Image (cartoon, rainbow, N blue to C red):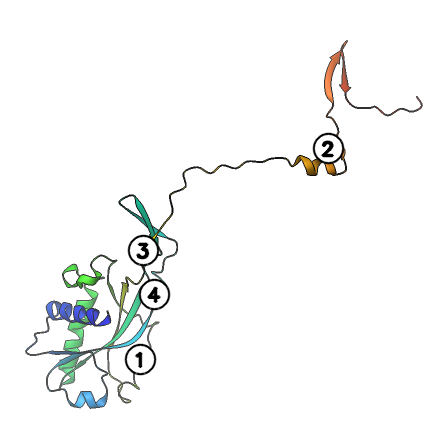
Amino acid sequence: MIHLIDQAIEQYLRAAVPLPEKSVDVSFVTPDKTWGKAVTQPSVNLFLWDVKRSAPRSQAGRIEQTIEDQRYRRAPLPVIDLNYFVTAWATEHRDEHQLLGAVLTAILATGELPAEFVPEQFAGGGPITLEVATSEQRKPGDFVSILDGQLKPGLEVGVSLEVDALQWKEAGPRTDVIEIGLARNERKASARTPTVDDRPRPVRRRRQGSVVMEGRREPTGPT
C-alpha cells in the first residue's frame, strides 16, 4: 500500500516540478551520510519517517449500502497520515535550494493528489491530501540525527489517505415501525396494599345549585 503512494508522489513531482528522470533522481531511502556521499547528480529524497492514524479526518458511526435488496454495513474507512521529510541534494547549495523551492511550490500548488496520479487501488476512496507542516508542527532539529548530525534544510510533507481495510457485513432488515405497549399486572396489583391512589375517584355533580362530590366520605365532627 505505502509503496503505491511513494510511486504516486514521485510521478506527481516529476510532472509538476518537473523532475526529468535523466537529470534528477528521486529516492525514498534514509538520507544518511553514506547515502549522501553516493549521490552523483541532483536528487530529491522523500524519507517516510512517521505513519499514524489521522485525528482530524477520523469519522464515527456506520455506513450502509444496498445491493440487490440486501443491506450491508461497515464503519467509515480509517484515515492514515504518512509524514515525509523531503530534502534536496546537489553539489552546490544554490542548486539544492532551487530544487527544494521547486518541490515546495509543486506541493503548495495542490491540496490533494490530482486524480491522474491516484493509484487504481485508491480510486474509489476519499481524496489523498498533501500538506506542508507548519512551524508549530515541526522543529528544525527533529531530523539532525537522521542526517548524521548535519542540519539540512527540508520540508515535512503530510500525506493523508483512506485505507480500505474494512469488510462489508450483512445487515438485518430495516426497522419501519416501533410499537410500545403498556399493560397492568393484575396479579401484582391485587396483592399489594391499597393506597390512596386506588380509591375511587370522586365525581362532581350539581344538585340544586350546589356542587356535590360523590364517592368521597366527608369527615364528621362537632358543628
Q: Which residue is mark 2?
A: 197
Question: Residue at 20% across / 67% down in the picture?
Answer: 107
Q: Earlier in the sequence, mark 4 or mark 2?
A: 4
Looking at the rendered image, the disc whose residue lies closer to the viewer, 1 or 4, is: 4
Question: Residue at 17% across / 71% down in the picture?
Answer: 7
Question: As shown in the figure, which amino acid type bears the numbered disc 2?
Answer: Asp
Q: Which residue is mark 3?
A: 168
* Local SS, label 4: loop
Instruction: State whether residue 110 appears in this view.
Output: no
Q: Earlier in the sequence, mark 3 or mark 4?
A: 4
In x, y percent, where is residue 98?
Answer: 14, 77
* Local SS, label 3: loop
* Local SS, label 1: loop
Looking at the rendered image, the disc whose residue lies closer to the viewer, 3 or 4, is: 3
The label number, if any, that marks residue 140 in the structure image: 1
Q: Residue furthest left?
A: 22
Looking at the rendered image, the disc whose residue lies closer to the viewer, 3 or 1, is: 3
Please tell me whether residue 94 is drawn above or below residue 188 in the rendered image.
below
Q: Earlier in the sequence, mark 1 or mark 4?
A: 4
* Local SS, label 2: helix
Question: As shown in the figure, which amino acid type bears the numbered disc 3?
Answer: Trp
Q: Which residue is mark 4?
A: 54
Looking at the rendered image, the disc whose residue lies closer to the viewer, 2 or 1, is: 2
Looking at the rendered image, the disc whose residue lies closer to the viewer, 3 or 2, is: 3
Instruction: State whether residue 123 appears in this view.
Output: yes
Q: Nearer the viewer, residue 196 or 187?
A: 187
Q: Earlier in the sequence, mark 2 or mark 1?
A: 1
C-alpha distance separating marks 4 and 2: 59 Å
Q: Earlier in the sequence, mark 3 or mark 1?
A: 1
The mark tally for this picture is 4
C-alpha distance separating marks 1 and 4: 23 Å
Q: Quadrant of residue 81?
A: bottom left
